[in-house]
Amino acid sequence: MTLSENQKNRRPSVLLVSIDALKPEFVFEQERLGVRLPNITRYFVENGLTAREGSKSVFPTFTYPCHQSMITGTNPAVHGIVNNGIFDPLGQHKGAWYWFANDKVKTLWEAARDGGYCSASVAFPTSVAAKGDYIAPEFWWDGSEIDSRFIDAVAKPQGLILEMEQDIGTYAGGLDLSDAGDVQRGKAAMWMLKNKLAPQIAEKPFFMSAYFASFDESAHQNGVYSKEAAASLEKIDGMLGELIQEAQCVTDGDLVVCVVSDHGTLDNTHNISPNILLKKAGLIQTDENGAVVSWRAFSQRAGGTAEIRLADSNDTEAVERLKEIVEQLKANPDSGIMDVVDSEGAKKRGGFPNAAYVLIADKGYEIRDDVDGEYCRTRLTQKAQHGYNEEFPEMRASFMLTGKGIATGNIENVRLIDVAPTLAGIMGVELPDAQGRNLLKN
């Protein structure tokens, strides 16, 4: 495709790719870790601007809050997506997640569209109802063909998913975080690029976000440094290379690519379940099947952290019982809890604005929601996890830029909330609510 000189001098198209849980060490210490990432090496390590020390994630370092922070430049307490799953002790929402883009602050999808870009997204977490031109959101219900119907109904424009599936097969079936699921996410991103963005490139540049999940899932199931996780990451690198190559062709090189992750990850050693203590204290009631039927205080996990909410902050008895429990957890060196943050402390860190307390676990102590059984066990639900203290080096995310006008080298003091304002600056669009900064602006 040949572009006019006027088109070549305009603002660049921008491709944002999130690789879930990609730790900086996998980018910069490939030989030590036994992984080969030729496309990341070529485009970013050798010819891009990278954060060798990583990017500081948000509180909590969990996928959905992180992705909405990435796309808004704000902390979870501001945009309102504070966890993966909606707080739901009684199961009234049947396992619903925060699938939806926030309605409190402006997203980069909306800013790009309003600023004259063709705005698109493929499989990006927290993108249902995003204000863009072409949105293929992440959403699931039962893993059957019904998912395609639901996703198509909430896609923008409606009909986008069914049109896409005629060419690539099923876009998504349930919460498929496997290698096979990533293959479909890669195909969907390529389809969007070729069929919706390329035809408009002569008129306007594009902003597109895309997402790969399998490295994170392989680490959850097999461990951070497992051969399975390394294999998933190498497959993602291959698909990333193909996507970048196609985007460069479509734009004739008038392109900036940003590859990021939402958080790091570390291997678990224990599972701990605070709700078991809350139930013993009479703050949670269950039926004969162990299902929660009423609660006065409840702990909801976010990996290595958990928020505890009170059903009624005026329930003085519950307030006192809960205070005793969290103080005991904090004082006990064997509890797996390194710190307890109160409501004001949580807000200062940018997360969990509705919590009475937030439990912050020691490294390796994943918090679960169980209400029965042992408080602490070494039988793991997942071999690796995130959601841990955002100050842990293991939770640092990746940040990489390459393309038109981007210098090469290392960049320091990067935060996840800097991604959106940096890309907004590249596109010359307005993101008025951002708490982060444009990393390219002196």
Image (tube, grey):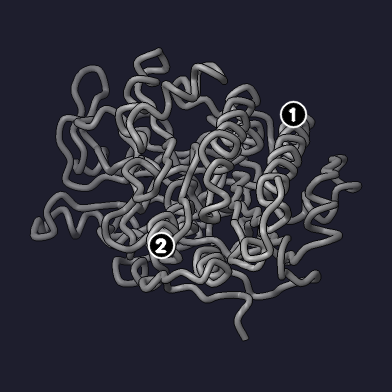
Q: Residue furthest bottom?
A: 442
For this view, does 344 lie left or right of residue 194? left
Q: Quadrant of the C terminus?
A: bottom right
**Which residue is label 1 attached to?**
228
- How far across and how far down the image is residue 415, in percent? 57, 68
At label 2, which amino acid type do we have? Ala
Determine the image quadrant of residue 349: bottom left
Q: Residue furthest right?
A: 31
The type of residue carrying mark 1 is: Glu
Res 297 seen here: yes
Question: In the rendering, at what x and y percent does residue 115 appear?
Answer: 42, 64
- The residue pinned by badge 2 equals 111
Tell me residue 259's x, y (percent): 65, 53
The residue depicted at 55 percent of the width and 47 percent of the height is 386
Q: Residue at x 65, y 31 (%)?
A: 218
Task: Please tell me how crowded label 1 is: few (under 14), some (14-19), or many (20+) other residues with Cα within 10 Å.
Answer: some
- Label 1 or label 2, whichever comes before in sequence order: 2
Q: Which mark is residue 83?
A: none
